[in-house]
Amino acid sequence: MSILNHIRKVHMIGIGGIGMSGIAEYLLKKKIEVTGSDLNLSFITERLESLGAVIYKGHSESNIPDDADIVIYSSAVKEDNPEYISAKNNNIRLLKRAVILGFIVNDKILISVAGTHGKTTTAAMIGKLLLDSGLDPDIFCGGNLDYLNGASSRIGDGNYAVVEADEYDRSFHTLKSDIIVITNIDLDHTDFYKDIEDIKNSFRIFIENRKINSKIVIYGENDNTVNLIRNILTAENKSDLIMYGKYNDKYNYSFKNIFYNLQIIGEHNVLNSLAALCVSDILGIDKTTFRKSIESFVGVSRRLELKYDGDIKIYDDYAHHPYEIYCSLTALKKISKGKLITVFQPHTYTRTRDFYCEFANSLALSDIIILAGIYPAREKYIDGVTSLLILNELKKYKNIKSCYSADNDEIIRKLLKIVQKDDVVVFQGAGDITLLCGKFVSAWNSKKNSKND
């Protein structure tokens, strides 16, 4: 923390990202001046501006104040970024977001929640639990939380910190955890990791960086996680491991241990809550407090978030990996009284290239699928990689209807023609598909109002 005790002004490259914005809020609350830049401005950057940050659209060397003490950059920022180059040429200290996060939380009793899927919701559940228990934790989460008034982070005065531990770019290697939760380990981020063994090795380093006498909580039905843990833990520290799963008696916690009701849908969220229960018991939090906290948890922004509930239901969902899509659509299928209609925006060219068959297989749980164009995020175009790869695979499923449109207005028009009473519509993807969801909610309301006039 010594580095943060002696700085007055920080510039942040990529400040609009959910992880970076959490650090920005932390610094602002510490009365440190914050400037930042991002390619696109959003409600996140608007929130930071309301808290006192100065934010520029686009990247330029002129954005960096001459008297900046340090420059913090996100994993998405490359060395050819003009602000990165300027900071380096002017001998301003450059630090990755993950390094700063480690400075902030490692001296506390640190609960790190990792996993290819489910870590945001699980970290949010645990953060709320500690807050409701009076432990006043620091919280750094990868999603906007209603119990933090839309923020993704908070500063506490207690001795605890809850952090979503991101595996991308090996960011979580800076964390020194007291409790580690691993929801699963699957192949993802193929723009960075070469294969599943590379990812498992990255998780190995994250686990081995833990503090002495730490506890490890894992989902016991994910083979990659179980096999990795078996190779790490010795006979002497097997007691440090706690496992949760669905029905098997070999787990420390399973569905038979559930004594509470959730407001959020999906078996995957039941499992997330079991992980939170494991942590609750490790910390000695009483069952009544846990139950009240988990039963009042309403989810995380964009994690299967119900945006409209009337004659139809409309959901906004961050799912962008085949397994996540499978979990979300399985949950929606169970509650749907009409058709399940999915609008999916693939996220990154590499993920589309490497998983287009798996995407089609998961999306086929829907009755109707509309594919939008790929959201590139940090990537440049890869020749031949488009949403049509997924569409061609979907054509093999004769019982579903699927189409592709790069025109968002056309997607809205298609939906207004095909959606009927009792249908469930879900907008999925980690890009700007959330904006299209909002437009459709408005369009549906307008259609209803025009009929009533």
Image (spheres, rainbow, N blue to C red):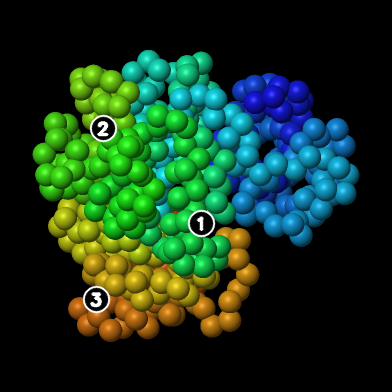
- Mark 3: few/some/many CA within 10 Å (<14, 14-19, 20+): some
Q: Nearer the viewer, residue 289 or 443?
A: 289
Single out the mark in the foreground, 2 or 3.
Answer: 2
Q: Is residue 185 left or right of residue 66?
A: left
Q: Secondary structure at mark 1?
A: loop
Q: Nearer the viewer, residue 236 or 208?
A: 236
Q: Which mark is residue 277?
A: 2
- Mark 1: few/some/many CA within 10 Å (<14, 14-19, 20+): some
- Which residue in the structure is indicated by mark 1? 432
Mark earlier in primary sequence (2, 3): 2
The amino acid type of the residue labelled 1 equals: Asp
Q: Is residue 334 left or right of residue 8?
A: left
The answer to whether residue 135 is above or below residue 255 is above
Tag 2 and tag 1, C-beta contact below 8 Å? no
Mark earlier in primary sequence (3, 1): 3
Q: Give the residue displayed 62% in from the left and 51% down from the top.
A: 75
Tag 3 and tag 1, C-beta contact below 8 Å? no
The answer to whether residue 200 is above or below residue 19 is below
The answer to whether residue 55 is above or below residue 377 is above
Q: Examine the rendering and report whether any part of residue 193 can be seen.
A: yes
Quarter of the image holding residue 8? Answer: top right
- Which residue in the structure is indicated by mark 3? 400
- Mark 2: few/some/many CA within 10 Å (<14, 14-19, 20+): many
Q: Examine the rendering and report whether any part of residue 264 can be seen.
A: no
Q: CA distance from mark 3 to mark 1?
A: 25 Å
Q: Give the residue displayed 46% in from the left and 67% down from the top.
A: 195
The amino acid type of the residue labelled 2 equals: Leu
Mark earlier in primary sequence (2, 1): 2
